[in-house]
Amino acid sequence: MIFLVDTVAFWWLALDSKKLSTTALHAFDDPNNELLLSPVCTWELLVKYNIGKLEITEPILDVLARARASRAFQTCP
């Protein structure tokens, strides 16, 4: 199945948040699923980070890169 992942769901995944449902985690972990991420998602998170709405201690690009690699997200065309 193909999933276009929402910004909030991607961010919760990046932070290993307990806010993600078990169903969502199973979908993200299923190797048969294709996970797509819109470039707008990255843009939204960068904007929020730059205006101080995301409280993280490491560089935002490192967080995003690690999250994308952890589940083999593809960029949506």
Image: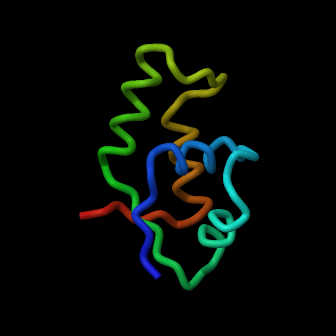
Residue that extends furthest to the left in the rendered view of this protein: 77
Q: Is residue 76 above or below residue 6?
A: below
Quarter of the figure with the C terminus = bottom left
Residue 75 location (% of width, % of height): 35, 61
Residue that sits furthest to the top in the current view: 52
Q: Residue at x 44, y 52 (%)?
A: 6
Q: Tell me the residue at 55%/23% (across/down).
A: 54
In the rendered structure, the answer to whether residue 32 lies left or right of residue 40 reads right
- Tell me residue 72's x, y (percent): 52, 66
Q: Position of residue 50 (x, y in %)?
A: 42, 18
Would residue 33 be found to the left or right of residue 29 on screen? left
- Name the quadrant containing residue 63: top right
State the image quarter where residue 21 is shown: bottom right
- Image position of 64 (left or right of 44): right
Residue at horizontal 42 percent and vertical 76 percent from the top = 2
Q: Nearer the viewer, residue 23 or 70?
A: 23
Residue located at (62% from left, 50% from top): 13
Does residue 70 lie above or below 56 as drawn? below
**Scheme by which the image is coloured:** rainbow
**Quick check: 21 above or below 8?**
below
Spot occupied by residue 59 in the image (x, y as percentages of width and height): 55, 28
Tell me: residue 11, above or below residue 36. Answer: above
